Structure formats: C-alpha cells, structure tokens
Image (tube, rainbow, N blue to C red):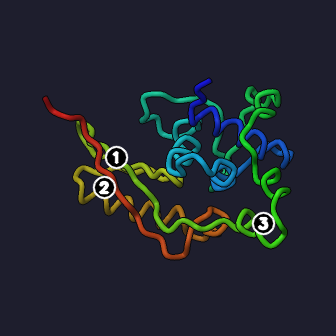
Amino acid sequence: MNVHVHEEVLRAAKQIASQRGDWTFAPYEVVQALPTLNESSVRTDIVSRCCINAPKNHLRQWDYFRRVGHGRYEVRSKYRDMRIAATATPTISTISSDISRSERTEFTHPARRDVIHAVIHAGEDAFTAECLEVAAVTQGNTLDEVVRNLNEALALFLEGEDLAALGLSDQLRVQMIFEMPLSR
C-alpha cells in the first residue's frame, strides 16, 4: 500500500495529540515521530497543505489541522478517530521505550532549526511570500518590497515568542525560494 506524506503526518499528529488530551501538537513533534520522512515535506504539510486556516496556495489541500497559536496546531474533530492512529509510524513515546535513558534527550530536546524557508510567488499585481515553518505571509509590489515586508512580518511574528517552543534557534536566517510559472 502506498501511503502519502500527508497521511503519515495525520497519523503521527493524531497519536501525539491524543496522548496530550487537548488534541494539539507542535510541528517538531511530528517531525521527530517521522524520522524517515523529509523534514521540510512534513512541516509544509502541517503548516500549509493540511491546515484549514493557512493561505490557500497549494494545488491540493486537506483539512486535517487548525492553527490555534504560534507553533501549535489542533487535529480537527472529524479526524480524531483513533482507528487510523493505531497504524501510525512509531512516535517519540514508543521509540524512547526501546532506548536507554541517556539517549532519550535526543527526542525530548529537539534540535532547533536555524532557517525559516519562504516561498515567493509572482502574481498578476504583486508578489506574495509565505513561510513554511511559521504562519507568516506578506506581499509587495516588487521583489525588493516583498523581501523587506517578509523581514518585517517575521520580526513582528517572532517578537516576544519563545523560539525554543517553536523549535527555532536564536540565530535565525531566512531562505527564500522564488516560484513562477514557466513561460512556453
């Protein structure tokens, strides 16, 4: 059976969130629970493709999650059926039961990301920049303007936030990817 990344992400998020009791989770928890998957793909699915209150710029989207705060997502009630979660990839709790106590710090204290990725899209009238790891979106009339606005939006978004709780380093950088349709 071919399982897609979004299905694995949903299963892992459900298992993590159900153990917490309030049905919330952080993206880094799902990344840790799915070490064999590409981290960027997992994060993109959580914060954008599978989140109902994220910007709608992907061709295919699922309504699995709702962003409830900075770096916090909730599994929507219609996806809380635990029969699907029972077949999930092992999570932090099941993996950590098989390793020694000293090795568990790897799972309880995740490495912090030092790069925030942003995808810039060219529209008819403006450029739009959307971050993949955090819920920050902005636009500008020129590329220079959208880059300035992105820097300002990220500064405002992160102001007063606990970067560690968001899985981010104190030494953040932004990596921008410019996306445009190919002219033929």
| Three-letter amino acid code at the position of disc 2 | Val
Report helix, strand or loop for mark 2: helix
Q: What separation in Å lies between label 1 and label 3 (alpha carbons)?
A: 41 Å
Say left or right for 83 vs 9.
Answer: right
Residue at coordinates 52% horizontally, 29% vertically from top-left? 61
**The quadrant where residue 9 appears:** top right
Residue projecting furthest to the bottom: 171
Q: What separation in Å lies between label 3 and label 2 (alpha carbons)?
A: 42 Å
Do labels 3 and 2 touch, CB within 8 Å? no
Q: What separation in Å lies between label 1 and label 2 (alpha carbons)?
A: 7 Å
Of residues 158 and 106, which is closer to you in this image?
Answer: 106
Residue at coordinates 52% horizontally, 54% vertically from top-left? 133
| Comparing labels 1 and 3, the label whose residue is closer to the camera | 3
Residue at coordinates 46% horizontally, 34% vertically from top-left? 56
Q: Which residue is mark 2?
A: 146
| Three-letter amino acid code at the position of disc 1 | Thr
Report helix, strand or loop for mark 1: strand
Report helix, strand or loop for mark 3: helix
On screen, residue 114 above or below 119: below
Position of the N terminus by quadrant: top right
| Three-letter amino acid code at the position of disc 3 | Arg
- The tag earlier along the polypeptide, 1 or 2, is 1
Do labels 1 and 2 touch, CB within 8 Å? yes
On screen, residue 132 above or below 81: below
- The tag earlier along the polypeptide, 3 or 2, is 3
Q: Which residue is mark 3?
A: 104
Residue 80 lies, in percent from the top left, at 78, 31
Position of the C terminus by quadrant: top left
Q: Which residue is mark 1?
A: 128
Of residues 109 and 72, which is closer to you in this image?
Answer: 109
